[in-house]
Amino acid sequence: MKMIYLKDLLEDAEKYLEQEILIRGWIRNHRKQKEFGFINLSDGTCFKPLQIVYDKELEDFDDITSINFGSAIEVRGTLIKSVGKEQAYEVKAKEIIVLGECSETYPLQPKRHSQEFLREIGYLRPRANLFQAVFRVRSLAAMAIHTYFQERGYIYLHAPLITGSDCEGAGEMFQVTSFDLDQLKEKIDYSKDFFGKKTSLTVSGQLQGEAFAMAFSKIYTFGPTFRAENSNTKTHAAEFWMIEPEIAFCDLEQLMDIEEDMLKYIVTYVLEHAKDEMEFLDQFVEKGLIEKLHIVLGHKAARITHKEAIDILQKSGKDFEFKPVQGEDLAKEHEKYLTEEYFKSPVCVYDWPKDIKAFYMKLNPDQETVAAVDLLVPGSGELMGGSQREEDYDKLLKRMEELGVSEEELDWYCNLRKYGTCIHSGFGMGFERLLIYLTGVDNIRDVIPFPRTPGNCEF
Amino acid sequence: MKMIYLKDLLEDAEKYLEQEILIRGWIRNHRKQKEFGFINLSDGTCFKPLQIVYDKELEDFDDITSINFGSAIEVRGTLIKSVGKEQAYEVKAKEIIVLGECSETYPLQPKRHSQEFLREIGYLRPRANLFQAVFRVRSLAAMAIHTYFQERGYIYLHAPLITGSDCEGAGEMFQVTSFDLDQLKEKIDYSKDFFGKKTSLTVSGQLQGEAFAMAFSKIYTFGPTFRAENSNTKTHAAEFWMIEPEIAFCDLEQLMDIEEDMLKYIVTYVLEHAKDEMEFLDQFVEKGLIEKLHIVLGHKAARITHKEAIDILQKSGKDFEFKPVQGEDLAKEHEKYLTEEYFKSPVCVYDWPKDIKAFYMKLNPDQETVAAVDLLVPGSGELMGGSQREEDYDKLLKRMEELGVSEEELDWYCNLRKYGTCIHSGFGMGFERLLIYLTGVDNIRDVIPFPRTPGNCEF
């Protein structure tokens, strides 16, 4: 008899009703009574476990009652309509076999554990309800992103991870070497290293993305990026995934349309495909999560310039910890006020002061601001950061000079402006930041399967 | 008037026929006659360029004739049926505007360049026909893989890239550090490094994949992996992407089913979605490419044990450079004979001698072989390598001891066998190896957007 995974079984439950089935999975709960036993079985293919009922008619009733929580078992039985309210279906067992016992030392007990403790057992935590929900949402959100872009004709670019350039901006980088650092005795000679030069882990695939956009018009990256920033906060990780679309013949206005459209697509997709998971997260992690997401679906994002944003904040009468100042960055509390109190919707803040933005952003005619946009969402603040890129060779070089960016290292990037340049724009979205927003989980360590943070590189 | 990308235009050509349209793109070819001009325009959203016809009626006819190959232009005109045989539609231009000129120094001229030269201009080569085809196939194949697994309920796992473990096997690793190696004067003190320990770039996500399979039953990874192997061959790269599915309650037989099913799905998807690209590759890169792929679609893979494979090779009467020997690995020429001459189909070779396979593979009852399988395909040889994993704690530890694998470092991995262990299997497929097979391109450097190989880390 062929085993069936629970997702396939329950999606087609009417077909299997009153039929004999063979299922396997892990015991998530086990209650024993004198004449009956109840097992909540999960194989992880769907969020809710399936209830298995067994009774004294089974020869090995007593042995079965002693099977530990966490054990892998095989169940042969009949799928029936459940009399309980908790579930629509259950299985009346004819045979229950232990496949893999679970040791008494199992650290993951059927009770509420702290998230700190669960991080310590990172290889087991995907079995806990919270992480069953979070990592399925992670998987589905990734698929939503791929589907969104591929359906619209974007080319998926695998930007390189190891880079010889250290001028992409955005903070500190990890160095990569094939030297055995234990054996390194004298000054490092990069000419003898694997790549014959100093190399690091990338902080962004944008520059390569622009090269591809000049060939395919619409491209996106979705890959890991790295920061060697020694920040032990809830929002920093050393290794995380980024999505960076880049679009030729697209200006800032159109970029904002794409950002918003993509966000709505992802939210819709996740709400549809992870109903049980989202309800769990709404109930136990962030009350009102689903409603928060529906606000995004139901509203067009407000669009204001950075100057207008500061004006609004200054006139708000709010006693901000950080005073809003023209020409300066927005603080978390400012983003919160704009999205949650003032507009009660996502907000695109565009035309930023050039001095606080990167060299590749297009200088506006006012010579003071750049065509950059941050998309802020209620609950999470900045979710995406993008800009129209400077497509003029001379202006780009001038900005690089002003900001001390090496022209020599980026000559190829500058050359894109000599060989059929055109208006183009792109944005970056941290995948984990999106997940924090989608799941309500507040610590980046809990939306990454095996997080890497200062002092932590386990499993 | 709203611009339309060529893919959207041509997919809906009948709707736009005789309508005025606005398009943008790059000049791929420009032929001028006395009264007429013909521009092949591409925006990279579809493989074939669109022909633009303009004539003397345009005021700036002479200026237009002088627009360089490679320039970005905007065309306003009418979509009409083409009288030529080359294309179904063309555009009669009413206005042609230069958006970005292309310098005379443009290295990518409209002629055949060597692949070596194109690698040197890696930031421009995606504009060349070959790479338009290859990188669109790459993108579509990635989507095919995601779609295959997601439709079947697999969870996409982002396995970590930076790892503290160096015992995953499979060769040399890059070290990762946040120390500035230029400044490193004394013996390295890993306790002061970013993660407080020695860290490297991963060679495989399998072990973490197993942890997730014990929670979600069906998972797959699709991410970058790294090898610091100093091999300058056509098949080695330092950075490449791998797909590693891992499935609980799945034995070797079922694993072979999945491998074959997935391969057929990807091939079908690419043939359907990249028709023009595949025809180009068939014509200019590997004659018979499409037929080769159809052989895979039309045949069930042969399944033979490693012992049977060696028997067949020994009895073949072939004068192999490397003599086939029981207990030893298969050489490229052996794979070629089995797939292209003997079976004329894909071949699964399973039950390999334990001494040439990894510690985590399940020992067969004969105590001599492990439940491993290599899937070989005509034209490329080994495409996937997989195995049933040793799910027994004691047996796993014994194998690790025999092979000198550190139990301490992998205690968490071993523990998976204590907490509800079960039969499970998985395989790995190098994404670039798949692409070499799908495109007929013979050098891994030409299927990776920005390849990293010994001495090469450009762009």
Image: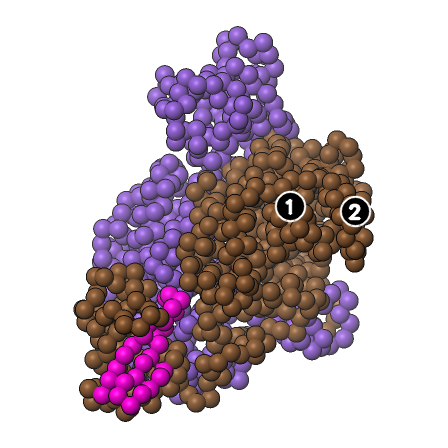
Chain colours: A purple, B brown
Compare residues A85 and A254 and report the one nearer the observer: A254
Query: Is A105 on the left-hand or right-hand side of A94?
Result: right
Q: Contact, CB < 8 Å: mark 2 with mark 1?
A: no
Q: Which residue is mark 1?
A: B343
Query: Is A449 on the left-hand or right-hand side of A387?
Result: right
B116 shown above or below B224: below
Looking at the image, can residue A99 be seen? yes
A204 shown above or below A41: below
Q: Residue at x 38, y 80 (%)?
A: B29
Q: Which residue is mark 2?
A: B314
Q: Which residues are magenta?
A: B30-56
> In terms of image quadrants, where is residue B14?
bottom left
Q: Residue at x 30, y 84 (%)?
A: B37
Q: Within 10 Å of the Cα at label 1, are there few (<14), some (14-19), or many (20+) other Cα atoms?
A: some
The numbered mark 2 sits on a residue in which chain? B
A409 shown above or below B304: below
Q: Which mark is residue B179?
A: none
Q: Where's residue A167, x and y in %?
A: 51, 76
Q: Identify the mark nearer the N-term, 2 or 1.
A: 2
Q: Where's residue B13, x and y in %?
A: 25, 63
Compare residues B78 and A319 and report the one nearer the observer: B78
Q: Is residue B52 magenta?
A: yes
Q: Secondary structure at mark 2?
A: helix
User: Residue flagged by tag 1: what amino acid is it?
Assistant: Phe
Q: Where's residue A288, x and y in %?
A: 30, 43
Query: Is A297 on the left-hand or right-hand side of A170?
Result: left
Q: Are marks 2 and 1 on the same chain?
A: yes
